[in-house]
Every structure is written in C-alpha cells, then in structure tokens.
Amino acid sequence: MPVVISLFRVVVGCGLLTACLIANGQHLVSAEEFQRREAETIQKVLDEIASKRKVDRYHVTAEDLAQDSRIKALGFDKPEMFSLLERAINLDPESLPISPKYRGYSLLDFNSNNPALKYGTQKISVTPGAGTTDLRSGFEKADLQVLHLRLTQTPSPVLPQKGTPPPPARPPTVRDLYFGPVARGFAEMQIKQAQNPGLKIDVLERYPARLYADRKGHLVIGIEGGFRFPHRLNTPQALIYYKESAATLSKLEAERQKSPRVRFPAPMLLRVATVVR
C-alpha cells in the first residue's frame, strides 16, 4: 500500500557526503554527506567565535552563529533557523551515520538488461492500495521532481471586541521547503488540495530527479540541477521497491489474503543523492 503523507504533515528527511564518479565527470553525493559537511561548518564557526571572544563554546548562541556569512550560506529556512542551529550546536559530526558510497552508478537505462528492471514497486498514486507494478512501468514516465516551495500563511483576522478598535492585522508566516522526490502529477494534486484562502503555495524551482543504478541493480534517486539540500527533503510519499518481480508480489499478496502467515518481501527504500558535475 502506498504511503501518502499530506503536504503539511511532511517529515524532514536527512542523509551524508560521499561522492563517486558515475559518468562524464558527474558524481553522486549522498544526503548524509551534505549533512556532515553542514555540521562541520557549524562547529568550525562556533569554535572560531568562541576563540575570538575568549569564551568557551558553551557561551556561543544560535543567534551568534546566524550572523556569520558561512551560516547564512547554508540556506536555513528563517522561521526554523534558530531551532535548527540550537540542535546543530550539540551535534558531533563524528556521531553521524557512515555515508553511503555510490561507486559505479550511472543513469538507469530502461531498455537495458540491468537486474533492477526485474524488481517490483508500488504504483505512484494518491489512492491507497493502488497495487504493484514493475520498476520500468512505475518510474520510466513518472517525471520525478524535487520542488522548492514557498508557503505563505495569512492568519485569519481577529474580530474586535465590542467598543474596542480593531487589532492590527497579524503578518503572514512565510516558510520555504523542499518537497520530493515526487511524481509531477502527484505533486500538483497535493498542492492543489493543500491550498486554501489563507494559504498560498508558490513553486520557486523544480529539480529533475531520476533513477541511477550500478551493474548489480542497486538503486538511488539522483537529484539534478545543482540541488544542495538532499538532507532537508520533505518526502510526501515513500518511494520503495522490492527485489522480487511484480508477478511474484501479486502472487504473494493473493496468498496472504488466504493465509496471513505467508511472508511478504521487505521493501527497500529508495535513497536520495545529488548529482554533482
């Protein structure tokens, strides 16, 4: 069954930075590595500020960090900047997971003999229980994207109490987020359903996302167009696959209807990386 999450209950994903040559001077850089580099930058700036002021690092605040040009360049969303920096201050880069190594990956050719094309996957749909299909049918024409969205929430006006002047209008709340990877049609439907008179959603930029694979059939979604924030993605729908064919999955699902003791293969989550030239 597809996992669908509302646009406004999105979960911030995270991930690290390992690059490896894939083709024509391109590299896949994992989301985990971006997170590691970000943590290292924050810790470096923190130590520099502490040294300059001759205080220990525990007296450096998120507000202090936010003034540095290197922190500004990290592109934190302003409403969440201080809370994110507060968490990052105490994050040891060495405690982060080991970055995946994407060696030997290239853009998946849907007309090749790559073993990944024999895998099954869930149909990309807003309808629960849409069923399974083969990887080629599921992704060849999916038009996956990551969207840079700007959400402008305008508060409802506060009605004045009798005999008092109307209170001043509250300013709108503006938030940027990165939404995806998601099929273009699915994204447009989610945005249309989420918008209301008090909420405006603008698409600032679209980044193409495509499947990359190695010769053994290991898969990753590569986000193109110079995308820098794979560790901050808001994922609306879990993109998964199974190392079994769609026919096998359908057969097992039918058998499970008769006997719940029949096991079903574990889903494999499609991880994300950025394609760097």
Image (cartoon, grey):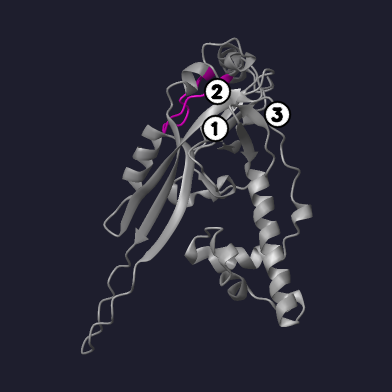
User: Which circle, 3 or 1, is nearer the viewer?
Assistant: 3
Residues shaded magenta? 120-135
In the rendering, at what x and y percent does residue 101 appear? 72, 34
Q: Residue at x 68, y 33 (%)?
A: 20
Q: Which mark is residue 103?
A: 3
- Is 234 magenta? The answer is no
**To which residue does mark 2 refer?**
121
In the rendering, at what x and y percent does residue 128 appear? 46, 31
> At label 2, which amino acid type do we have?
Thr
Q: Secondary structure at mark 1?
A: loop
Q: Is residue 195 above or below residue 215?
A: below
> At label 1, which amino acid type do we have?
Leu
Q: Tell me where residue 42 sits by quadrant.
A: bottom right
| Sequence order check, earlier mark of 2 and 3 | 3
Q: CA distance from mark 3 to mark 1?
A: 22 Å
- Is 124 magenta? The answer is yes
Residues at marks 2 and 1 touching, judged by CB atoms closer than 8 Å: yes
